[in-house]
Amino acid sequence: MQTLHHSHRPRRLKTLCLVSGLTIALLISVIYTTKAEAGLRVITTIAQIAEPLRTIVGNHAAVESLLGEGVDPHLYRPSRSDIMRLTKADVVFWNGLHLESQLQDALERLSKVKTVVSISDTLTKEKLLPFDNAGLDPHIWMDPSLWRTALAHAVSVLTALDRTNAPAFERNARTYFTRLAALETYTERAIASIPAEARILVTAHDAFGYFGARFGIEVMGIQGISTDSEAGLKKIETMVDALVTRGVPAVFTETSVSERNIRALIEGSAARGHMVKLGGNLFSDAMGQPGTYLGTYVGMIDHNVTTITRALGGDAPKSGLNGKLDHDG
């Protein structure tokens, strides 16, 4: 019996080695297959980039944004976990133009070893709005036509990185950009319906410059381009003078900015005998809750346009462009 036992040990070892080798090969195959099926891993700074790209790439890539609902990109500082997420990405997209000022150094260092793209780089200086005689306004998503150009730049980067899925990316982008064209047409008609004398948009900070320039509405922000600048008493008094003199009917808060200064405008105007109503809460630097209509770029702009138009005496349906809004009044 011992002889039989010893004679089978080499065979069992050979069988075990063969099974182990097959198992390792299978695991390696599964790992590489899973990675291939997952496609590119894309990280963006703001959701205004992530959500459209997620729609465009479908299930061919994974897209995440660092900044979530209500987060101010001007003030945001990356955590260690954020840096780790960035280093694991295949490609990183950011707005640029100093919007993500606290992230800029990290992104520039990362660009030496990874594909890191500022989507605003594709826009010529003539299309950008200046501020403070030196910088450029970073809020380019407020003009859907500019945002389409910037997103098209991101899509071209993705198609170059993933040639297999490039046709799907390009096809989905065409469909998505058709939706942006419809959004732009809706906005043009809605803003044009506001009485000319009431076509003044007063907000917490200067995030709506591109919106105003594109759709013909005057824009007044209490704070500057960046929310890290504080509005002084003199600025509040000057704006109260403008509201009273021009009979501005409504002012607007922003979801990512304190409403303190807007409340000061309302109270200051009331003290001067001019009643200004709160027209609504607008999305400026951040979108709504992920997974909802307001958490999409189209939904964000639709909400803003519909809210502004109805508060300033224009004509826009309560349910907005796509029938997905719920506005009172």
Image: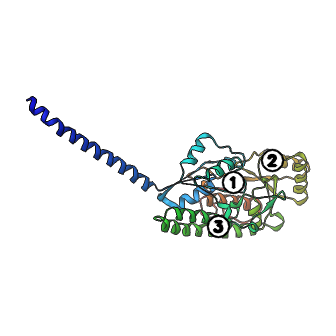
For the question of whether residue 215 can be seen, the reply is no
Numbered-mark total: 3
Separation (CA) of disc 3 from disc 2 = 29 Å
Q: Nearer the viewer, residue 143 or 41?
A: 41
| Location of the C terminus (image quadrant) | bottom right
- 10 Å neighbourhood of mark 1: few (<14), some, or many (≥20)? many
In the displayed structure, 101 sits above or below 190; it is: above
| Location of the N terminus (image quadrant) | top left
Residue 35 place in picture, x, y as percent: 43, 52
Farthest-out residue, left: 1
* Amino acid marked by disc 3: Thr
- Give the residue displayed 84% in from the left and 49% down from the top: 265
Q: Nearer the viewer, residue 146 or 161?
A: 161
- Give the residue displayed 87% in from the left and 53% down from the top: 239
Farthest-out residue, top: 2
Dot 2 falls on a residue whose secondary structure is loop
In the displayed structure, 4 sits above or below 293; it is: above
Separation (CA) of disc 1 from disc 3 = 21 Å
Quadrant location of residue 298? bottom right
Label 1: which residue?
283
Decide which of tag 1 and tag 2 comes sooner along the chain: 2
* Amino acid marked by disc 2: Ser
- Give the residue displayed 10% in from the left and 29% down from the top: 2
Label 2: which residue?
229
Residues at badges 1 and 2 in contact (C-beta under 8 Å)? Answer: no
Q: Nearer the viewer, residue 253 or 96?
A: 96
